Amino acid sequence: MKRYYRLTLVVAILFVLVMGVSELAFAQGKVNMKGGPLPEKEWLSNPGEGALNEDHSKNKNWITLWYGPDGNYENNGGFAGSAPKDLIDEGTNGKITQLELSTVEGLKLTQTIDIAWKGANGGTRGWEIFEIDPADAHHMNRDGPADNMDMYAICVIDAPQDMKSVMSPAHDDHAQIWINGEKWYNNSAWTGAAMEVDFNIEVDLVKGANIVLYRCGESGGHAYMNLHFDDKTHNDAEIYPQKADDQASFFAEIARVLDVEAIGKLTTTWGDIKQNR
């Protein structure tokens, strides 16, 4: 009888372990995009692989704090028309582009350069820290128009070493993601739910500061843009903002990170360009 109970206990423990690992793997998702960043000719092409339609609602890593313009680009004419446009370049009269904004030097420029979109598109925008609720399928609205808008959001990942990472976006509608001056993701197809992921993308992070720029263009209906990385990235790296509540405290929070020596060749190149303007 004792042997029976022991066997039952062992089976029960193994079942719990297997289920736990299975649930974790499901929450993390299957990597189905590798080989990035995207070449320029594919910057506006959708992924070729099939969508996974994974439910990541149990994942605890969704990023909730972001840095970006203090309001959206409004009246975009629908995401299909706005997606090819560089709205950062448009709003800063060429002083910062989308690509540059995903670099250390571009991020630093936001301390002195605001966005000046036309009045019909939202007007002048400063830079702020804002919080989103990943479970809210309408969090992009930000007290502005509910439809026909583009939203930009930035986070900084301080990686302990060069590393492979997996990012998992959920979005409605057209998502574009840049990291360190390179484009890693473009998809005009909505993911179906606020925490449903279609593509888990393997990306390269460098030791020190990694600037992630996430843009989502919306036409109508649900409006959300969510992102998380794999557990190892969230456990080993620091992701900012953390406690900052405005632009000044954000840059104070990441001051040490931005001073990291190895910020990447492309970032340094953009810095040289800016100094010569």
Image: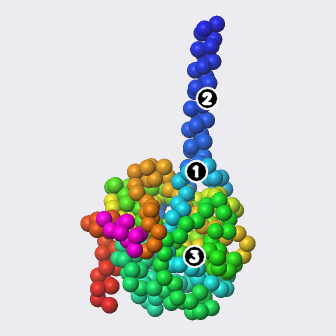
Disc 3 element? strand
84, above or below 241, in the image? below
Q: Residues within 10 Å of mark 3 (few under 14, many from 20)?
A: many
Q: Residue 151 bears which disc, if any?
A: 3
Q: Given this view, does label 2 or label 3 mark the residue nearer the observer?
A: 3
Disc 2 element? helix
Q: Residues within 10 Å of mark 1 (few under 14, many from 20)?
A: some
Query: In which quadrant is the C terminus drawn?
Result: bottom left
Q: Earlier in the sequence, mark 3 or mark 1?
A: 1
Q: Which residue occupies 62% across, 53% down?
A: 56
Residue that mark 1 sits on? 59
Residue that mark 2 sits on? 15
Q: How is the image coloured?
A: rainbow
Tell me, yes or no, whether the two marked residues, 3 and 1, touch with CB atoms within 8 Å: no
Q: Given this view, does label 1 or label 2 mark the residue nearer the observer?
A: 1
Q: Amino acid at mark 3?
A: Met
Residue 214: image x %, image y %?
52, 70
Disc 1 element? loop
Q: Read off the magenta span.
A: 248-256
Residue 128: image x %, image y %?
49, 75
Asked if residue 37 shows in the view, the reply is: no
Q: Which residue occupies 56% across, 32% down?
A: 17
Q: Which residue occupies 59% across, 73% down?
A: 216
Tell me the CA gap for discs 2 and 3.
Answer: 44 Å
Asked if residue 254 shows in the view, the reply is: yes
Q: Residue 167 bears which disc, if any?
A: none
Q: Which residue occupies 39% across, 80% down?
A: 111
Residue 146: image x %, image y %?
69, 77
